[in-house]
Image (spheres, rainbow, N blue to C red):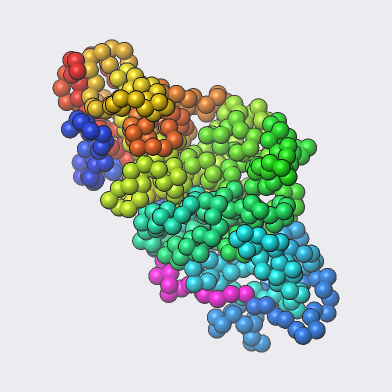
Amino acid sequence: MLTTPSRPVRTSRARRVRRPLLLTLAGSSAAGVIGSLTLVALPASASPSQDWDDIAYRGGIEVVRAADGPEDDSVLTGTVFVDENRDGVSDADESGLAGVVVTNGRDVVRTDDEGRYTLPVFDNMTVSITQPSGHQVPVDEYNIPQFHYHHLPEGSPELRYGGIEPTGPLPSAVNFPVVESAPTAEAEQSCVIAGDLQTYDEQEVEYARAGAIKDLSERDDYAGCGTLFVGDVVGDDLSLYPAIKELAAETNGPARFLPGNHDLDFDAPNAEHAFDTFRAQLAPAYYSYDVGDVHVVALNNVDYPCTAAEDSPEGIEEHCADPEGDPSYNGRISDEQLTWLERDLAHVDRDKLVVVAGHIGLLNYADESSPVHQVDQVARVHELLRGREAVAVAGHSHSIENLKKGDDVEGWRDLFGIEGLPFPHITVGAISGDWYSGEVGEEGYPTALGRDGGRPGVVTLDVEGNEFRERYTITGEADDVQSRSAINSPTYRRWFEERQEWNDAPEGEAPEWDEPLVVDRADLTDGSWLTTNFYLGSTGSTVEVSLDGGPVEEATRTQRLEGEGVNVGVDYSDPYAVSQQLVHGGTLADRTMHLWRFDLPADLEAGAHTAEVTTTDSYGRAFTDVLEFEVVDER
């Protein structure tokens, strides 16, 4: 059982100082962030595994073809077997594995006592197994699991990026090898959920390699569960998939993928073939797998070209009005896939944790009023998971959102009739951040600060049994780097408006915000506050501030998530992120669900001041940063 630590006593012995990241605007004050003080141990994770290359089971499935074909071409048969000698061939002395779930994307069956299955056949089906806990399916040389077979006899229609090659007649059998695996059996798992690699060219592939992929290559805590890349694997150019595979080869566990709206075959004649190249290169369009006491469902919730349905929310009919002449995508799960999901869950013990993953969030904060960028059938998915321990994870919005059970936003009510989340929904950020925008640092990748001021990174679900804790790892940083503080002052707010106007119509010298950590007497009189962007902060989190060693006071969260609309504008912005974005490019961080505000006293004396900012997450894990700033009588 996961336990929540009690709040630690402040003590200098527990402090570990890290090198600061300072504002880089010309003329910045010497005052700044001076360090990070860690008050508790790092978040718990699964025990480090053996070296992945020593335990990885490499190989593929066994496709058996007879000269005269199968006896009955209306059904596919085969076996799930334990591959004792790891050669991928079902030898006579190797046992079948009973009770494994096998599907054709519609029907879901279990293998019999000898590991055999039988499934109905239809064109353009993908047959796959649900990896059972305690076993590992084979992975290829790129760490990509091999647990599926596409049946498309004539192959894809002509597509720019190739699609699926003709598979020919139905095989006599498709056999799925597995090996016993201690890492996938453990109750403690660390599951990496990575959003939006979204590389548009080879340069951006290298940004990803130097950043998040390097981080993953140096971790050894996720060999059992692996990494799930939740869509927008590339940015429309599907010829980059081989380069993405090379990135996956650098990780230390299975690398799984699900499709996003930038993984589409845009020249496909219909939705049936819209993800053929993705399927050929990376994975089925949807599937499931088990590790420990976790059941992961990877969904395809991108409908392209979209059409409105009876259960579509208001706005979809107009958005999807011309699927042939002006095709668009929408967040939607096909009826066939929903039927599969219901059948898949029927085989899952009710005491397991279900992780339901998709590219587009079932619901999210950043796009709470958009019918397109959330999922039409969210209420249906919620109903299917009623009474289960569950968490939804997604990417797409290039924001970090740790939404807890009960959180509520106006748009969810208006569009879907959802009043409060029934279980947590996490938008995991993006490896690409704000599409690789901003300055490129010495490490070889851009700052890419997000629309919520968040920094690029990945989420890890640390699981024990059917309970989990989420943590966020910023690219290039340790787990204890969780927030950034800044100052929102009238001087900043004026510059915000002036710089926006100048950026829209550049003329003369650009307005500069020269001293972001200096406030004058007029700033304090007219209202200045310290902001803390707690990237994975959520309902149940707190932010506390001590000025100059004085009493600890609680900051106020700027978005309560109690059914209100989204707060947008300079008063709700992250000044640090905006200072980078307005100067170096990127989406403006003028809204976030994880920003806290602490009003600065109007009577602060002139001189240097220190704010000790302690962020505490919903599990009681605390992290403290120090921000130094200066008060002057006048500029």
Numbered range of the magenta stretch = 49-61
The image quadrant of residue 212 is bottom left
Q: Position of residue 466 (x, y in %)?
A: 55, 52
Which quarter of the image is occupied by the C terminus? Answer: top left
Q: Which residue is at a point 34% across and 25% down the rendered structure image?
A: 507
Nearest the viewer among 226 and 592 is 592
Q: Is residue 252 above or below residue 518?
A: below
Residue that sits furthest to the bottom in the current view: 92
Q: Which residue is at a point 64% across and 48% down the rendered structure image?
A: 301
Nearest the viewer among 115 and 350 is 115
Q: From the viewer's perspective, tell me whether residue 388 is left or right of residue 452.
A: right
> Within the magenta stretch, is there residue 530?
no
Q: Position of residue 37 (x, y in %)?
A: 26, 41
> Within the magenta stretch, is there residue 55?
yes
Q: Is residue 590 visible?
A: yes
Q: Is residue 349 visible?
A: no
Magenta: main secondary structure:
loop
Q: Is residue 321 above or below residue 59?
A: above
